[in-house]
Image: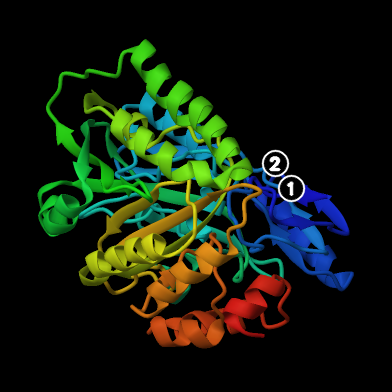
Amino acid sequence: MWRNWAGNVTARPARAVAPASADELAAVLRAAAADGLTAKAVGSGHSFTSAAATSGVLIRPEGLTAIRSIDRAAGTVTAEAGVQLRQLNAALAAEGLSLTNMGDIMEQTVAGATSTGTHGTGRDSGSIAAQITALELVTADGSVLTCSADERPEVFAAARIGLGALGVVSAVTFAVEPVFLLTAREEPMAFDRVMSEFDALVAENEHFEFYWFPHTDSCNTKRNNRSQGPAAPLPAVRGWIDDELLSNGVFQAACALGRAAPAAIPGMARISSRALSARSYTDIPYKVFTSPRRVRFVEMEYAVPREAAVDAIRALKAMVERSDLRISFPVEVRVAPADDIALSTASGRDSAYIAVHMYRGSRYQEYFTAVEAIMTERGGRPHWGKMHTRDAEYFRAVYPRFAEFTDVRDQLDPGRLFTNDYLRRVLGS
């Protein structure tokens, strides 16, 4: 049995394989087709949807873990599909290079992260997929296809966030730049102040995000901006206390208590929000963008037009306050600029991401349903790797380039070798 990180998705494949090259992967796909089986590739399992689930051939990532090349002159790195972002970041840092932007964790594989649209926050810099310059894709007939802005551009426009529907990604080439320093400034801020200053905070900072603690009027804000240095990392003890003891150990205990005794959650939220203190540190990018996340949860996230962000967040807060819901996880808000990827949640529009979480094993359905109604009223697009109930009919309405993607799918996988229940729902048959 295969199980995702959160434990909410399982699959029993007919067989599991770990090809170690694009040629081996092509042979796996030809064999699956000959046996009448579907095929799906998995990464590290950090998606909350069943995008990678299959009863056919499960393609595991551990055979494709080479960093093929780092080209300093071209400003690129080519990594095989199963390379974890953690490994990629360390290899780049050793060469004095860096990705421009990152999400907040780095356990995912490069193919899994990009195929589902993983992103961080950025005024000018977009998702990890937006940093791709070329892709190697093994298609349903066993062909190895490469694409870029200049080579098969119609495939490149779709495949950077391909949902596993167009083929199996075997390698990804990213744009990189010389490593730089970021200064992170974290500080508590009142909810109403964040709302009134949201546009200014986004405009004035390269990377702005905040967390609102339900049942309180308190937020924690984070502003990351490039720095001339010198480097000033968090002291080891302070970092361990804040990011391991409090953000993981104590938070885990609080979530477990809240699941057993929901009435205690508002009081714990008020204590937690008052316990926050400001801090500032300067380090290389991936050490600022990412944090350890050991408390397991389920998550829903929607991208709304940037101009609808404050209205949507206020509506979410009002919904929680008039309900009987008890929410132990903060709501996370990030931003991204418009990009040109067909099914990117930021495709064609500046976006704000609003993410809600519930501790694993808690009842999440009522909360997520209410949040989804707020987001869909504003034309929201759900993260492809996070929980939602939308279908192909909805996506045709909110993605102007939806038909462009499905046309590429029809060309590359007419027999639907790569389909599963999730893709049938979100893309149609």
Counting the numbered discs, the total is: 2
Location of mark 1 (residue): 19
Whether residue 6 is visible: yes
Q: Secondary structure at mark 1?
A: loop
Read off the residue under disc 2. 63
- The one nearer the camera, 371 or 134, is 371
Label 2 packing within 10 angstroms: few (<14), some (14-19), many (20+): some
Q: Residue at x 27, y 48 (%)?
A: 217
Q: Position of residue 183 (x, y in %)?
A: 20, 30
The answer to whether 110 appears left or right of 52 in the picture is left
Amino acid carrying mark 2 in the image: Gly
Residue 347 left/right relative to 56: left
Badge 1: few (under 14), some or many (20 or more) residues near its Cα, within 10 Å? some
Residue 28 in percent (x, y) is at 79, 58
Q: Say what secondary structure mark 2 lies in.
A: loop
Marks 1 and 2, the one that precedes in the sequence: 1
Q: In the rendered view, does 334 fall on the left or right side of 34?
A: left
Residue 422 in the image, given as x and y percentages of width and height? 65, 71
Q: Position of residue 322 (x, y in %)?
A: 39, 65
Work out whether residue 52 or residue 309 is closer to the camera in this orientation and state it: 309
Q: Residue at x 62, y 47 (%)?
A: 360
Point out which mark residue 169 bears.
none
Which image quadrant is residue 133 in? bottom left
Position of the C terminus, as image quadrant, is bottom right
Residue type, numbered disc 1: Pro
Question: Residue at the front extreme?
Answer: 263
Residue 153 seen from this side: no
**Marks 2 and 1: in contact by CB < 8 Å?**
yes
Q: Residue at x 83, y 50 (%)?
A: 1
